[in-house]
Image: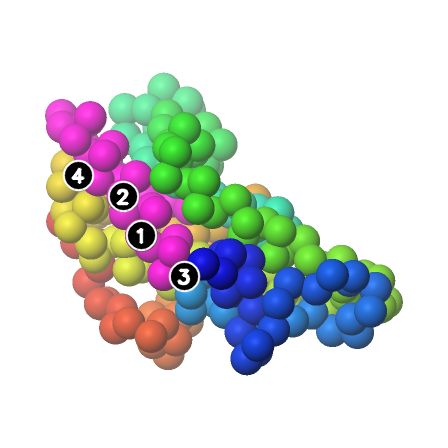
């Protein structure tokens, strides 16, 4: 069976390069396939978490992203935990959330381990060819993929099993940006329906 790394390169017949220095541009990344994998893994994690936390009421689900590392941390928080952390004025301080990175101990996420290699390969090819100016576009593509995935997860049965407050929200945000940029990205993707799957405008309702 082809490795996940090879399947992520979208061009027909392409494989992971043996030597990055021979490439002038990164091989195309199949963002749709990466999105589908992220949806499956995150929904599975949330479903298992919901079964283990049947009483707590959550106000938000987040993807704490490190686009430069190809990392996504699944996070959930309650208002009680928010107050205890002194973050009443910041709904999206992921690093202070009680349940931050709940996927880190989930063995299913071994399937994600090669995604950072894909991002690293693409970044290294750009840097080796003095195209570092293209890195922001690469990282933005990753964040758009993660946002589309989160919007799909928000509609899943897994999230439906969580106890949620009436204003339950979701957000995918890079560790180097603020919530305003992340919200703007999410609203843009909602409007343009970039995902291959329909995104329901009411995804945040309980």
In three-dimensional space, the C-alpha distance between marks 3 and 2, rounded to whole angstroms, equals: 14 Å
Q: Secondary structure at mark 3?
A: helix
Sequence-first disc among 1 and 4:
1
Q: Main secondary structure of the magenta part?
A: helix
Q: Which residue is found at the position 82% from the left and 69% from the top?
A: 22
Q: Quick check: 49 left or right of 100? A: left
41 part of magenta stretch: yes
Mark closer to the observer (1, 4): 1
With respect to residue 90, does 181 lie above or below? below
Residue on which disc 4 sits: 162
Residue on which disc 2 sits: 44
Viewer-proximal residue, 30 or 195?
30
Query: x%, y% of residue 140?
Result: 57, 63
Sequence-first disc among 4 and 3:
3
Q: Quick check: 66 left or right of 144? A: right
Q: Which residue is found at the position 69% from the left and 69% from the top?
A: 26
In three-dimensional space, the C-alpha distance between marks 1 and 4, rounded to whole angstroms, equals: 17 Å
Query: x%, y% of residue 130?
Result: 86, 67
In three-dimensional space, the C-alpha distance between marks 1 and 3, rounded to whole angstroms, equals: 9 Å
Residue 60 appears in the rendering: no
Viewer-proximal residue, 105 or 195?
105
Q: Quick check: 78 left or right of 134? A: left
Q: Which residues are magenta?
A: 36-63
With respect to residue 69, does 16 lie above or below? below
Query: x%, y% of residue 38?
Result: 39, 53
**Contact flag, marks 1 and 2 (Cβ < 8 Å):** yes
Residue on which disc 1 sits: 40
Residue 35 is marked as 3
**Contact flag, marks 3 and 2 (Cβ < 8 Å):** no
């Amino acid at each position: 069976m082809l490795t996940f790394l090879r399947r992520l390169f979208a061009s027909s017949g392409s494989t992971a390069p043996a030597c990055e220095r021979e490439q002038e541009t990164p091989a195309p990344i199949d963002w749709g396939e990466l999105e589908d994998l992220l949806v499956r893994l995150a929904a599975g994690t949330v479903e298992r978490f919901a079964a283990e936390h049947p009483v707590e009421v959550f106000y938000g689900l987040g993807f704490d992203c490190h686009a430069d590392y190809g990392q996504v941390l699944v996070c959930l928080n309650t208002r009680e935990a928010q107050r205890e952390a002194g973050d009443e004025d910041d709904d999206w301080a992921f690093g202070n959330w009680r349940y931050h990175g709940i996927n880190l101990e989930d063995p299913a996420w071994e399937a994600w381990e090669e995604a950072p290699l894909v991002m690293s390969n693409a970044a290294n090819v750009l840097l080796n060819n003095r195209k570092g100016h293209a890195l922001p576009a690469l990282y933005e593509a990753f964040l758009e993929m993660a946002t589309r995935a989160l919007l799909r997860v928000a509609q899943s049965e897994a999230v439906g099993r969580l106890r949620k407050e009436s204003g339950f929200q979701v957000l995918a945000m890079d560790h180097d940006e603020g919530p305003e940029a992340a919200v703007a990205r999410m609203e843009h993707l909602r409007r343009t329906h970039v995902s291959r799957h329909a995104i329901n405008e009411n995804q945040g309702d309980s």
